[in-house]
Image: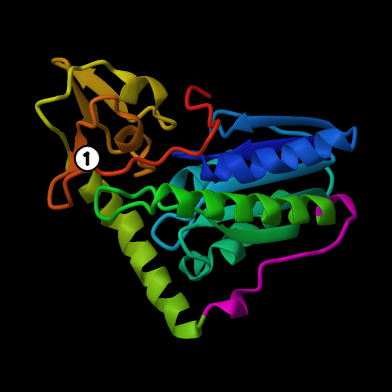
């Protein structure tokens, strides 16, 4: 079976769970490829396609919406599975239902979907957990991804049950997501700034998954396409990036999933 895997990941959570599936498929002797999601990809063909991405503000990241929107309709009924990572399963709201709805007009059928709890990386307004706690979450997430991979190979239908999330919270989360997409994300992007310790090394711009950072006068500038994935904040060698009106990030524990290839 030919399998194509695509991920969008700021600090490696979504890559971790999809890479776990990659290893399972590879061990089963399937022809499998895993790549960072690229919205310029014009077409994708496989017996099975897997997507993984984080939940942003209780919903789908815009890059996922754009990618699916630009994909041409599949010639044959396309099997798809979806893994979503979040700080808490309840934070996913209607994301699983929404992406399935976007895929239907593309002649795709979702055979499996799951929300997997993984460590928090939004350290500008909150904090990540202690290393030991994060390791425990990662290990549990990996085990959950293994189960999904095995179910997919056995053609088991296994979809995330939206009823796990209270109706009130779904409506609240969807409202917050609409506000985030309409203006919140851009407002948060304007809040990015740097401490005097920034030396203009350019690592943030070089590794930004949405190419949303430019180095101007030896300092980073964030563009409106910024997805708020928090990669730049967590990988800065000088710990120099923060968001105004948020919390300071100096001396805060940074988060990057073990083995995550930030240059891909």
| Residue in front for this viewpoint, 41 or 210 | 210
Instruction: Considering the whole magenta stretch, tell me its main secondary structure.
Output: loop
What residue would you read off at disc 1?
251
What x and y, as percent, mark residue 249? 21, 42
Please indicate whether residue 233 sits to the left or right of residue 132 in the image: left
The residue sitting at the left extreme is 196
Q: Position of residue 196 (x, y in %)?
A: 9, 26
Closer to us: 91 or 71: 91
Residue 6 place in picture, x, y as percent:
64, 37
Start-end of magenta stretch: 152-165
Which residue is found at the position 20% from the left and 31% from the top? 240
Is residue 115 found left or right of 236 in the rendered image?
right
For the N terminus, give its image quadrant.
top right
Left or right of 169, for residue 72: right
- Residue beneath the point at 60% across and 62% down: 96
Colouring mode (rainbow / by chain / secondary structure / one colour): rainbow
Q: Secondary structure at mark 1?
A: loop
The location of residue 103, given as percent across then percent down, is: 66, 53
Looking at the rendering, which quadrant does residue 141 occupy? bottom right
Position of residue 233 relative to residue 58, above or below, is above
Q: Is residue 50 visible?
A: yes
Farthest residue, direction front? 132
Q: Is residue 55 magenta?
A: no
Residue at 39% in and 29% down: 208
Q: Residues within 10 Å of mark 1 (few under 14, many from 20)?
A: few
Would residue 63 be found to the left or right of residue 2 on screen? left
Quadrant of the rendered image containing residue 58: bottom left
């Amino acid at each position: 079976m030919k399998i194509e895997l695509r991920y969008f990941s700021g600090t490696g959570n979504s890559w971790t769970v999809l890479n776990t599936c990659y290893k399972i498929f590879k061990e089963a002797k399937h022809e499998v490829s895993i790549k960072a999601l690229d919205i310029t990809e014009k077409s994708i063909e496989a017996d099975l396609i897997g997507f993984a991405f984080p939940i942003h503000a209780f919903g789908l990241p815009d890059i996922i919406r754009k990618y699916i929107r630009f994909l041409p309709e599949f010639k044959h009924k396309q099997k798809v599975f979806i893994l979503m990572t979040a700080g808490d399963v309840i934070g996913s709201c209607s994301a699983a239902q929404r992406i399935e709805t976007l895929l239907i007009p593309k002649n795709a059928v979702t055979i499996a979907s799951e929300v997997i709890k993984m460590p928090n990386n939004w350290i500008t307004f909150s904090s990540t957990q202690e290393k030991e706690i994060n390791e425990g979450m990662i290990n549990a997430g990996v085990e959950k991804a293994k189960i999904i991979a095995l179910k997919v190979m056995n053609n088991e239908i296994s979809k995330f049950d939206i009823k796990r999330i209270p109706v009130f919270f779904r409506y609240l989360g969807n409202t917050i997501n609409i506000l985030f997409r309409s203006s919140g994300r851009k407002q948060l992007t304007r809040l990015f700034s740097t401490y005097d310790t920034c030396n203009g090394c350019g690592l943030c711009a070089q590794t930004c998954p949405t190419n949303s950072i430019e180095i101007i006068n030896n300092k980073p500038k964030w563009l409106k396409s910024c997805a708020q994935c928090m990669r730049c904040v967590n990988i800065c060698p000088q710990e120099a990036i923060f968001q105004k009106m948020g919390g300071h990030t100096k001396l805060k524990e940074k988060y990057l999933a073990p083995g995550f290839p930030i240059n891909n």
